[in-house]
Amino acid sequence: MNRSSDPDTATPLTVETDIDVSVAGRPVDVDSTGDRLLVAFPTLETARIAARAGGPSRIRAAADTLATADLTAEIRVRDRTVLVVGAAARPGFLSRQLDLTPAEFRLGGALGVLGRELGALVDAVREPW
């Protein structure tokens, strides 16, 4: 992370990372683009395990920390953004209904993930035993 120590010339906080972490033994990629963290889960099941371990209270805590630092995290599943947390998040009706505020739930991303999960299931069934 970079931040100038002089408040008069302070630059925005940036994150420089490209790390691999795992959830229940499954890989989760974490990359950054300066002010945006990209957390990429390979499957819906991996994201579900992580979500159950954290829950809404951890999402709110992360959102507060990220917003204070003027950073944003995109939570992606199968290359589709399903949740935005932090400075750029714009929570709406679904975020409130799902108790995810102040995070932004992206319905289009979630539907895209379901389609890709279904496609992966069909591919797995078609493969010979």
Image (spheres, grey):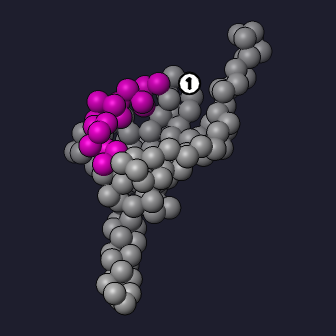
Residue 115 appears in the rendering: no
- The kind of residue on which mark 1 rests is Ala
Residue 68 appears in the rendering: yes
Compared with 14, 120 (above or below) is below
Please identify the quarter of the rendering in which residue 33 is found: top right
Residue 63 x, y percent position in the rendering = 42, 31
Residue drawn at (43%, 25%) of the image? 64
Residue drawn at (44%, 39%) of the image? 85
- How dense is the environment of label 1, judged by Cα within 10 Å: few (below 14), some, or many (20 and up)? some
Residue 70 x, y percent position in the rendering = 57, 28
Q: Is residue 60 left or right of residue 98?
A: right
Which image quarter holds the N terminus? top right
**Residue topped by disc 1:** 69
Out of 71 and 43, give the one closest to the viewer: 43
Q: Is residue 63 magenta?
A: yes
**Secondary structure that dominates the magenta span:** helix
The residue most toward the front is: 129
Which image quarter holds the C terminus? bottom left
Q: Is residue 24 left or right of residue 71?
A: left
Residue drawn at (47%, 34%) of the image? 86
Compared with 31, 70 (above or below) is above
The residue most toward the left is: 97
The residue range painted magenta reads 49-65
